[in-house]
């Protein structure tokens, strides 16, 4: 047994073990050191966790778009981050117009719904065009080709929006109802906007889940993702189902864009890039192609990213650990892909597909 | 019975609407206005108008070719119709801008844009716009009727008129170095852009030349092939030597600005040759390629900077080596990084590999930017006072045999763009030579096998680990060299110089040139790096155009502009039976 193991054990394996080991060591030592130093009270940790969940639900919404498309087309829709950006950016103009006329503060519910509608419509339009123009003609092309097209589409969309709307940051208007916070007793405080984000994201995800599990279209989507050719033989219009998948993913991304913009107030043409990669990480984390997995992965990544820098790095005496939160997220992506490419919940994906 | 002339109004209308959408888009993203500052033919037509005209022309052309079943005279009509629809949409845009106050949303929907679209007139301008649309659309239809060869010549000639008009400022500046040539060609240029006679002459020369070459060129090639092998090789070597001599003499003609542009292109060629090995030869899509560039640049920066100390803007450790001592270390560091980042991704393919490498690139950039590593590599303030390449005078050459002009008898610094040019040129040549020799060597063939099918390659006994790592390491070496030269060229480095866009830039240029093709890297770099550097307007829309170019290339010509023979066959499998056309020599030296 041991001999066989040693025969197959190579230098690269050793290297990977060392890397993995040292990262685990770093995390453990850092966490213990931070907790022992006790610079952070329970309230701090609570804030980190709530913030992490809020951010994570936005990631989860975007991640669903990656996962849905990957499940059906086996391709990473690299331009999905721009679908998300387009919704958030266009929603700004609706929000701004309604805020200026005072409508948003008088009828906050209608106003917010209108912003969501505008954003989701834009995202869906962009995604459908994208699918029609850039992806559909390449369905039978070698794997690298659609991926490069997607990268091109991503940059094209980014800079188109920059050209259309200008390159400066735009600030979302304040909505009076969403200002302030609720006290949960004691020193624990939760901001209203974070509650909205978490609740809304949960609603969206629940309805998606019900849609995929219990409607005719959902069933067809699952069939296409199992096997496109057989699904076509069973009388399913594969192209139509693919378009509907893009529509679903894009509407979730548009909603995520508005939620993100309401939380962080700022939108610009480049805002899709980082959340896009993180959402992809979340999708991979949960097992790409797996819907509950994407939700779980998003929440997990959000939490990790919010708590992680302080917990792991502060105790090691690294200055300004929050600057490294993206490094933590990317490292996590790399680690998941190396050690468990099927993700937490995924088992369908063999290495040949990865 | 003769088939009734059917005419598909619907598809003509559809194409017209599509053209209109494109025209509105390029107007609203500001390209039309921005490009209007550059005349192509002095006082006649600007680049901005040209963009609109190209959109209409394309609409007309496609509408006409869709109507291919119809009688010939109907095709220009169909083109005119499509052009009319396109320009009608633009006219609609002009009409709705002021009442809806579109400018508050689209900053580029400005009065200046309206002025351009209506030819500086008021309402009458809209009529002109519609007429232009119909006429240009009809012209597009006419182009479709022309015999294929004439069409190709005409399009090529129009392209060259446009290019020369765009570059006229630079051409004139360059011509000042050669007064005689400048005076002889003065009539060709107007105050901005080409003059009218100049444009006509360029058009006739290019169109005629291209047509003649297409008709007669075959004979010349035949004659060349008929030569005895020794003579043929001599001709090839001779032309290569002439080409090298011209390239070596270039900086004397170009002046410092154009040399600077050439250097920029050269650095990207160097990186492109490296990524070409990783993506083009081995088929490993690496989006974090900038990481190695950054490592090379930072190695050069940290090891040679003079700004060492405890003060702000200084780093705590720096051995202050010389450029030449550091260069191999920088390349070595990049290679090491290539191997270190290569090991974790050995088992990944395609999409996953792309995302993970992208993550690596970002990790490196964020680390460079962080306060955590600031004392060592400067954080967001970067590293200043990076050393430059200096060569001591060679004593025997300084005893008076040589005129000072040929070999200056003092320290010679690679600092001015014109001198740096030679260093970058040498680097490119070295990289080109290595890639060329590697391509058909054992590892080169292993890379190609890997690209085609990893599992089969492994089954054939190829060591995947070694092959992949060699590809990553070689690619990283070129990139590191490029980064090191870059650091010394600008003298100071900042983390912002090493973002994802560089990786995308390099990737685009090898895809446009043709994946796996060595001359393709040069073509791609000239188009994608050279043009935007020369034209400020282009650089504004650089990434937009890269994105569009990547999509269009993948849809229409996935093998690139100058494809490698095997790749070409792969993408056009109907021609798979054809024997390999080009030998490696003829592909690189011509």
Image (cartoon, rainbow, N blue to C red):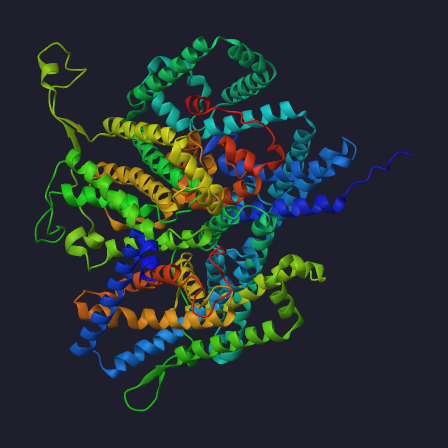
- Is residue B281 visible to the viewer in this orientation of the structure? no
User: At 24% across and 43% down in the image, what residue appears?
Assistant: B297
Query: Left or right of B350: which side holds A236?
Result: right
Q: Is residue B550 above or below residue A23?
A: above
Q: Position of residue B190 (x, y in %)?
A: 45, 24
Residue A91 or residue A93, whichever sits in front: A91
Residue A306: quarter of image: bottom left
Instruction: Please give the name of the residue rendered at 42% of the width and 39% of the height, measured from the top-left corner.
Output: B447
Residue B496, percent from left and from top = 28, 50
Give the residue displayed 39% in from the left and 38% down from the top. B277
Residue A347's spot in the image, x, y percent? 48, 66
Q: Is residue A45 left or right of residue B145?
A: left
Task: Residue A1 in the image: state x and y as whole percent.
Answer: 34, 62
Please tell me which residue lies in front, B180 or A282.
A282
Q: Pick the residue in front: A293 or B282.
A: B282
Q: Is residue A137 left or right of residue A86?
A: right
Q: Residue furthest bottom?
A: A185
Position of residue B381 relative to residue A190, above or below, is above
Please indicate, yes or no, whether residue A131 appears anywhere in the rendered image: yes
Tell me how many marks there are: 0
């Amino acid at each position: 047994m041991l001999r066989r193991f040693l025969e197959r054990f190579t230098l690269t394996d050793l290297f990977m073990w060392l890397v993995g080991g040292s990262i685990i060591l770093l995390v453990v030592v850092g966490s213990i050191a931070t907790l022992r130093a006790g610079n952070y009270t329970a309230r701090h940790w609570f804030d980190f966790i709530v913030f992490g969940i809020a951010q994570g639900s936005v990631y989860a919404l975007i991640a669903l778009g990656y996962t849905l498309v990957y499940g059906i087309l086996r391709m990473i829709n690299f331009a999905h981050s721009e679908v998300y950006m387009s919704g958030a950016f266009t929603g700004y103009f609706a929000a701004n117009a309604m805020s200026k006329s005072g409508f948003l503060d008088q009828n906050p519910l209608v106003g917010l719904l209108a912003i969501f509608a505008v954003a989701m419509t834009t995202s869906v339009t962009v995604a459908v065009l994208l699918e029609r123009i850039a992806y559909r003609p390449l369905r039978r092309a070698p794997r690298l080709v659609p991926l490069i097209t997607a990268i091109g589409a991503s940059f094209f969309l980014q800079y188109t929006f920059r050209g259309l709307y200008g390159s400066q940051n735009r600030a979302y208007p304040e909505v009076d109802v969403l200002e302030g916070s609720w006290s949960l007793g004691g020193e624990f405080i939760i901001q209203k906007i974070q509650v909205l984000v978490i609740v809304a994201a949960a609603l969206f995800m629940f309805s998606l889940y019900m849609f995929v599990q219990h409607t005719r279209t959902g069933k067809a989507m699952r069939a296409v993702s199992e096997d496109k050719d057989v699904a076509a033989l069973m009388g399913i219009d594969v192209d139509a189902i693919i378009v509907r998948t893009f529509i679903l993913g894009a509407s979730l991304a548009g909603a995520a864009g508005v939620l993100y913009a309401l939380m962080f107030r700022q939108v610009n043409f480049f805002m899709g890039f980082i959340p896009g990669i993180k959402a992809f990480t979340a999708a991979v984390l949960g097992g790409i192609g797996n819907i509950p997995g994407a939700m779980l992965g998003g929440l997990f990544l959000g939490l990790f990213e919010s708590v992680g820098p302080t917990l792991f790095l502060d105790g090691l005496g690294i200055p300004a650990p929050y600057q490294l939160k993206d490094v933590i997220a990317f490292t996590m992506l790399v680690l998941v892909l190396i050690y468990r490419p099927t993700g937490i919940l995924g088992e369908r994906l063999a290495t040949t597909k990865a | 019975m003769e088939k009734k002339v059917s005419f598909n109004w619907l598809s003509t209308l559809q194409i017209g609407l599509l053209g209109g959408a494109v025209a509105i888009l390029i107007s609203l993203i500001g390209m039309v206005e921005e490009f209007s500052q550059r005349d192509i033919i002095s006082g006649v037509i600007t680049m901005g108008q040209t963009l609109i005209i190209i959109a209409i022309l394309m609409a007309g052309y496609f509408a006409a070719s869709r109507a291919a079943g119809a009688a010939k005279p109907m095709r220009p009509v169909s083109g005119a119709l499509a052009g009319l629809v396109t320009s009608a949409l633009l006219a609609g845009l002009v009409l709705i801008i002021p009442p809806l106050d579109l400018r508050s949303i689209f900053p580029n929907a400005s009065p200046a844009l309206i002025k351009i679209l209506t030819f500086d007139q008021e309402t009458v301008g809209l009529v002109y716009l519609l007429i232009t649309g119909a006429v240009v659309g009809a012209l597009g239809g006419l182009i479709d009727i022309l015999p294929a060869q004439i069409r190709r010549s005409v399009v090529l000639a129009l392209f060259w008129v446009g290019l020369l008009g765009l570059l006229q400022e630079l051409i004139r500046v360059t011509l000042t170095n050669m007064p005689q040539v400048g005076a002889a060609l003065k009539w060709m240029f107007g105050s901005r852009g080409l003059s009218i006679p100049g444009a006509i002459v360029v058009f006739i020369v290019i169109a005629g030349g291209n047509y003649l070459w297409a008709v007669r060129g075959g004979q010349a090639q035949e004659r060349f092939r008929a030569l005895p092998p020794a003579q043929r090789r001599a001709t090839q070597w001779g032309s290569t030597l002439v080409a090298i001599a011209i390239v070596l003499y270039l900086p004397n003609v170009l002046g410092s600005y154009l040399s600077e542009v050439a250097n920029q292109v050269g650095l990207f060629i160097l990186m492109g040759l490296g990524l070409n090995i990783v993506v083009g030869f081995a088929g490993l899509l690496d989006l974090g390629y900038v990481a190695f560039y950054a490592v090379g640049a930072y190695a050069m920066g940290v090891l040679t900077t003079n700004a060492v100390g405890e003060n702000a803007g200084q780093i705590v450790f720096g051995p202050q080596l010389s450029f030449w001592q550091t260069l191999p270390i920088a390349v070595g560091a990049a290679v090491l990084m290539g191997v270190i980042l290569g090991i974790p991704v050995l088992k990944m393919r395609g999409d996953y590999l792309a995302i993970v490498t992208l993550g690596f690139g970002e990790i490196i950039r964020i680390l460079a930017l962080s306060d955590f590593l600031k004392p060592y590599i400067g954080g967001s303030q970067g590293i200043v006072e990076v050393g430059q390449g200096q060569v001591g005078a060679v004593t025997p050459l300084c005893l008076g045999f040589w005129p000072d002009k040929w070999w200056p008898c003092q320290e010679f610094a690679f600092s001015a763009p014109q001198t740096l040019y030679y260093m970058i040129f040498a680097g490119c040549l070295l990289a080109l030579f290595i890639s060329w020799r590697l391509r058909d060597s054992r590892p080169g063939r292993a890379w190609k096998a890997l690209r085609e099918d990893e599992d089969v390659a492994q089954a054939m006994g190829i060591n995947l680990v070694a092959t992949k790592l060699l590809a990553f390491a070689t690619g990283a070496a070129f990139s590191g060299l490029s980064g090191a030269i870059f650091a010394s060229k600008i003298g100071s480095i900042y983390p912002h110089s090493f973002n994802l866009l560089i990786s995308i830039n390099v990737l685009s240029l090898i895809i446009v040139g043709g994946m796996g093709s060595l001359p393709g890297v040069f073509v791609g770099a000239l188009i994608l790096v050279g043009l935007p550097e020369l034209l400020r307007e282009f650089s504004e829309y650089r990434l937009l155009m890269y994105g569009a170019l990547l999509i269009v290339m993948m849809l229409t010509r996935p093998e690139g502009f100058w494809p490698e023979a095997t790749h070409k066959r792969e993408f056009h499998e109907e021609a798979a039976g054809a024997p390999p056309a080009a030998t490696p020599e003829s592909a690189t030296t011509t």
